[in-house]
Image: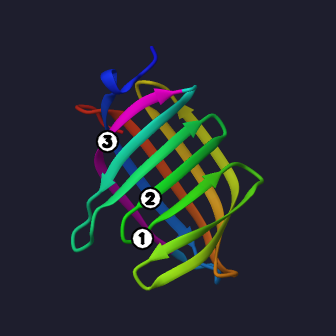
Amino acid sequence: MSLTPENERRVWVTLRTSGIDPDGYAEEEQTLRFPGRLTENGGAYLLHYTERIEDTSDTEVHLRLRPGKVMMMRQGDYSVSLIFEVGKHYEGVYHTPFGDLDITVETLMLSDHISAKQGDVLIRYDESVSGQPAGVRTMRISYAPRGTQC
């Protein structure tokens, strides 16, 4: 079944992030859950949600999920567009209220199980900010119909 805006699915999005800083110290894992929308376009699943975190402004997140490739666009006070694809470097600009920073990611691992009903994407990537190593990050994005767990 092809999903269009007329038949988009309302989903729960669970975002889990963790990392290891350049000195080898593990950063605290965070788990966040948001309502979202899922559609399909041209063989890719489009996942949209708004990050609403206490004491911060909202961030709109748009993900284009294809087997082996994830495109992410975050729009808000802290905005960035990134592409994750194993073995490839991607350079972008991280826009902040305090100025812009160059960001580079190299995707080390990407595992995905995506469908029109539910999905799970695990990404491990090496990140550099303004030419300096920022660490190895892990991001897991899961989605499932509202009323279920993901």
Q: Secondary structure at mark 1?
A: loop
Q: Is 94 covered by the magenta stretch?
A: no
How far apart, in angstroms, are the residues tagged by discs 3 and 2? Answer: 14 Å
Residue ID at (64%, 60%): 125
Residue ID at (64%, 52%): 84
Q: Is residue 118 left or right of residue 92?
A: left
Residue ID at (31%, 22%): 6
Residue 119 position, x and y percent, is: 47, 34
- Magenta residues: mostly which secondary structure? strand
Q: Is residue 88 left or right of residue 100?
A: right
Quarter of the image for residue 35 reads top left
Q: Amino acid at mark 3?
A: Gly
How far apart, in angstroms, are the residues tagged by discs 2 and 1? Answer: 8 Å
- Quadrant that contains the N terminus: top left
Mark 3 / mark 2, whichever is N-terminal: 3
C-beta proximity under 8 Å, tags 2 and 1: yes
Viewer-proximal residue among 125 and 76: 76
Residue 71 position, x and y percent, is: 57, 48
**10 Å crowding of disc 3: few (<14), some (14-19), many (20+):** many
Instruction: Indicate which disc residue 36 carries.
Output: 3
- Quadrant that contains the C terminus: top left
Query: Which residue carries the number 2 mark?
Result: 74
Q: Considering only vertical position in the picture, is 79 above or below 24?
A: above
Number of residue marks: 3
Q: Amino acid at mark 2?
A: Arg
How far apart, in angstroms, are the residues tagged by discs 1 and 3? Answer: 20 Å
Q: Amino acid at mark 1?
A: Tyr
Query: Which residue carries the number 1 mark?
Result: 78
Residue 62 position, x and y percent, is: 44, 48
| Extreme residue in the top direction | 1
For the record, the magenta segment spans 27-41
Q: Secondary structure at mark 2?
A: strand
